[in-house]
Each structure stands twice: as structure tokens, then as C-alpha cells.
Image (cartoon, grey):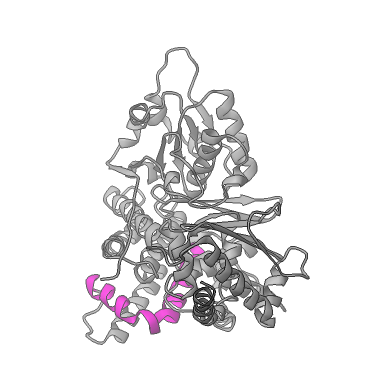
Amino acid sequence: MPVFSSSEELLHVMKTLWEAIKADPTMSSQLIDSRLVGQFQFREPDGIITIDCSDGQNFKIIVGPTDIKPVIEMSMKSDIAHEFWLGRISIPVALLTGKIVSKGPTPKALALLPIIRPAYSMYPKILEAARKNVLVNS
Amino acid sequence: MQPFQFQSPTKLFFGEYTAASAYESLKELGSSNPLIVTDANLVKAGILEPILEAFPKNGSGSPVIFDDVPMDSDLHSVQNAVNLARAKKCDGILACGGGSVLDTAKAVNICLTYGGNLLDYQGLNNLPTKLLPLVAIPTTAGTGSEVSLVAMIKDSDEGKKLLFGSRFLAPDLAILDPQMTVSLPARLTAATGLDALTHAIESYVALAVSPISDALCLEAMRLLFKSLERATTDGGDIEARSDCLVASTMAGLAFTNSGVGIVHALAHATGARYGTHHGATNAVFLPFGMEFNLEAAAERFATAARYLRISTNTDDQKAAKDLIEAVRNLILKVNLPLSLKDLGVPEFKNGDLEELAMLASTDAAIMFNPKESTQEDIVAIYTRAY
């Protein structure tokens, strides 16, 4: 059974996580400096999140389909994304074993992994809060 | 045991003079008019003759040969080969050469199969379907490209390397004919052999190891320690050539499944900055990279040292150091440099080390290293290796 019960839950968690990364000055400044536009395409349940740092000044988080052309696309099962943010799965190994499909300059994206590592510790709290929120609202 | 995955879509065929069977094998795979991707020097030296003789002489024209592959395969070369293959209606590829030739052939196969722009297929696991038949005949024993799932292509205009990786990229068949490697000069034999040894040693301690890759790495190391010096000093020693060729393929199978590490990252950065030979650069960094990894990999290095009968020491640290010493001795025996200075790298100026450290620390290979490294660690290795 997938970790996320719906696309709404998945996207809410991922959006909240990226907003937390954006709010962290160390992580966000390095990502903005990279000028990377990365798109994460999730399946089971489905969802798309795009991170746009292309102008070197702003950190945009776009939820859902967009006309922005990503430099790199990474597609994976939502469960793989969950495992990654828990620090249980290595992206390079997931790429090597075919669990993640990357389109574009993969090494450029891999180079950013150490930057977002502090977000691993944020993720469980964000997930827990999102689930409580769902329970409260249901 | 940790869960693991191991794949190899490539059939192997080893034997002296087996290269002559390439056309027959391609026909069995469904290609009767393959593009031959090779190196002009191999054509000039007549090394391709046994392969070409097997092609039909039915008046429909001679085999279609593309031999304009640069030392580092690049986009222009790929496009020129694709244009030729399309004009001649080729339906498969025979790649005969070193790593650059084999990588070029893989990239050509992407364009020939799908059409469109090669850049659209940059990435990992990003190819949708099986490609046209590809048979690879390595003429060096080092890169492992004949069984690897990746291709690196240089974008000379942008000054960067493009990475393509997919199980569909692996050749359908690799023909390992030691006769095809006998004319390789001593220095290249040594350098490519050290590339293979680096694959075997780094893969043995990399993040995605498995019992399957372990076995391949250990045996590849054994064959290389046994025969690389002989293959270097006597290029005509077919037994030694065979050992090196098979070891290189075994190490290629291992690293394509378990990854490499910091030595490759340092060598990629150095090669990009100074144009040094990949294998010889790996040789310089291998002992230093192993020393850096001792903390995380002493037990594995020690196991390898005992398997290779390099050490009988029961203390892992000491046995691991015996392996590093044996690597240094092998490099000396095959007359390769042990320092960056001897490799021809100019003295570092202000900012050079930082730039190299940045390049190395963002190289994909380093992501599989068993021990994490800081920029300071990398600068320290560069300084010691100089």
C-alpha cells in the first residue's frame, strides 16, 4: 500500500517540505545560486512539483503541471520519494538500479544532494503534521 | 545480506580470433547492414581486416565504416556517424575500439533508433525501448564499456560531458578477442589495465556492492595482479592479454552495478582540467584514494589482500595497507607515474586546487564512495598526490 493515500496528501507534504527548504537561508541560497530548474514527477499516487531557481534570485515552487521547461526531470514512485526524504534510500543507488528515471544533466542534480541533506530531519515532522491535519479535517 | 540488484544484458563471447564472427553475430541479431564505428589507426594498421573479410562481397558496396572518433567521444562525431548511418540505411552497429569508440557507438545507436536529438535522451533510465543491434569488440582492456550501461559524450561547444545511462545502452554482444589487443602499446596497456584495476578496487568497496559484484571484483583483481605486468612488457603474450581483457570486462560488469568512487571523481576532474589520460590518472590517485577510504573499507581491502595472497596478516588495517602497497608496486612495475607531477600536471596555482576540488566533489562517481569527503579532504589528496 502506498505511503501517501492521495495525490492531495503527497503534494501537500512535498510542497510544505520545499517551502521549509526555501525558508532555510543556507539551503535556499545554494539552490538559488545553482539556477537549476528541477521537476519531480511522482506516480502512485501521481503529482508534479517543479522547483525553479532559474533567475538566480527567486526560489519558486510550482505544484502541478506547468509550462516551465525543467533542466532536469526526475520521475519515481511516491514511495521512493518518501524513502529518500527519510534518508533511507540513496539517490545514486536508486538511479543505478532504475528506481528513479532522470532526464537531463544528472550529475548537476546529484551535486545538489548534499545541499538539501538538512531537509531529511524536517521531513518526518512535516509528514506527521500533514497527517494530523488530514485527520483533523476529515 | 542487504537487498541488491544486478543486471547484465550483454552476452559475452571470448576467444582468440573470435572477432571474425562479428558479422555473423550481427546477422543473428537482425542486422545485415551494420555501421562499423572504429578508430582510424585501427583501420590503418589492418586490425579490422579479419572482421571486414567476413562481410558479404555481393556488389552492394563495401562495409560502411565510420572511423573519425576523437580521443574523447563528442557530439559532432556522433552526429557525423549518425548522418553516415542514415545515408547508408544501416540497421545495426559494430563497434571496434577503445572506450571512446564504444561510447560513440552507443550514442549513435540512440539517434539511429529513435531519431531526434541526442540531448533529449540525456539522463539515466531515460531510453524508452530496446535499441538496434550493437556488437562491441574492445581493443583495449580497461574501460569496461563493452558491458556497461552508460556512455559519456563530450559537448565540445559547451565544454561539458553528457551522461547517458540505460540498460538498453549495453551492447547485445561483447566479443572478447585477445588478438584484437596485442598491438596496443605498452604504456596504453598499462594505463588501461590500471583503469580496470581501479574499477575492480573501487567497485569492491562502493555503496551498491553485492555478492555478485564482489566475486567479479576479486577475480578481476587477481587476473590483473597476475598478468598486467606481463601484458605490458610482452604485448604478444596472449595468455596475459586474455587475463587483462577478461578482467577488464569483469570489472566493467561490477562497476556498472555497484558504482565507483573518489578515485574516479579525482581523475575525471584532473582529466577535464589538464587533458590527462584517464587510466594513468586513475593510477596516480588509486593508492591515495584507497588510503582515504581505509577508515570505511579496511575490512574489504583486507579481504581482497588475503584473496590475492598479497597479505596473510590477520589485522585488517595492516592487510589493507599491504594491498595499497601492492598497488603502488604494480604501478611502478608497469612504468606508470605515481604522482600528478610525473603525470605532467603543471604546478598548482592560486585557485586551481579549489576548482579541482569543486569539480571532483560534484562528480557523479563520488556519490558511490564508501566514505564521505569534504572539499578539504579532496584538496589534501590532490596535494599529497602531486
* Viewer-closest of B210 and A86: A86
Q: Residue A60 location, x and y as percent?
A: 71, 67
Magenta stretch bounds:
B280-309
Q: Quadrant of residue A79?
A: bottom left
Q: How many marks?
A: 0
Residue farthest top in this picture: B59
- A133 and B382: which one is in front? A133
In the rendering, at what x and y percent does residue B328 appear?
Answer: 40, 74
Residue B20 x %, y %? 34, 31
Q: Is residue B359 above or below residue B8?
A: below
Identify the residue shown where x is 43% and y is 48%: B184
> A90 left or right of A40?
left
Q: Residue at x 70, y 51 (%)?
A: A67
Point 52% across, 30% down: residue: B65
Residue B135's image quarter?
Answer: top left
Which quadrant would the C terminus of chain B be assigned to in this image?
bottom right
Magenta segment includes B5: no
Compared with residue A8, is residue A67 higher up or lower down, i.e. above or below? above
Percent coordinates x, y for residue A69 in the rendering: 69, 53
> In the picture provided, is B283 more to the left or to the right than B299?
right
Which is more toward the observer, B142 or B345?
B142
- Residue A104 relative to residue B61: left or right: right
The N terminus of chain B lies in quadrant: bottom left
Identify the residue at the far front of this view: A138
Could you say which is closer to the camera, residue A11 or residue B356? A11
Residue B284 part of the magenta-drawn span? yes
Magenta segment main secondary structure: helix
Question: Height in image: B261 above or below A75?
Answer: below
Q: Is residue B161 at all visible to an observer of this figure?
A: yes
Task: Mark yes or no: residue B284 visible.
Answer: no
